[in-house]
Amino acid sequence: MATDVEVDRAIATITATLNDQKLEQFDADRVQEIVTEALGGESHLRVDDGGGLHDAATGARVGVIRRTPSGEWITERQNPDAERSDAPVPSPPSEG
């Protein structure tokens, strides 16, 4: 299972590399190479043909890669499990 650090590292590397190389079209195989290299050769994350970034162990989608109309590549993290956490939200401090 990919750690939060690995997901963040992969996302940053994908965005920087695609924009530096000025790729015109999404190439899942090339992006998979970028991800694997960013993780030191480990295959904790998989890239699908539609620009999804998935945890290899669970299949959960953890990110999405897309190109804006202006040509910039953006990789956004997706983690629906974090939004459904049962952890209590702390109350703001009282003003007293």
Image: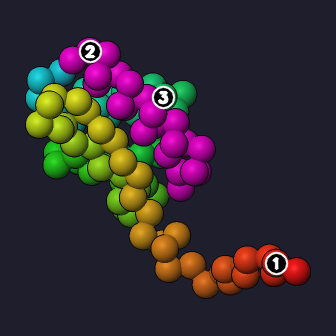
Q: Residue at x 18, y 37 (%)?
A: 67
Task: Identify the residue position indicated by label 3 in the image.
Answer: 38
**Residue 53 within the segment the image draws in magenta:** no
Q: Are marks 1 and 3 in contact (CB under 8 Å)?
A: no
Instruction: Look at discs 3 and 2 and give the one toward the viewer.
Output: 2
Q: Residue furthest right?
A: 96
Residue count near mark 3 (Cα–Cα under 10 Å), binned few <14, some 14–19, many ≥20? some
Instruction: Look at discs 1 and 2 and give the one toward the viewer.
Output: 1
Kindly identify which numbered label has been placed on residue 21.
2
Q: Residue at x 57, y 51 (%)?
A: 4
Q: Are marks 1 and 2 in contact (CB under 8 Å)?
A: no
How far is mark 1 from mark 3, CA to CA? 46 Å
Kindly identify which numbered label has been placed on residue 95.
1
The percent position of residue 43, horizontal first and vertical second, equals 45, 40
Residue count near mark 1 (Cα–Cα under 10 Å), binned few <14, some 14–19, many ≥20? few
Q: Name the main secondary structure of what is drawn in magenta.
A: helix
Query: Relative to residue 60, is residue 94 drawn left or right?
Result: right
Q: Nearer the viewer, residue 80 or 96?
A: 96
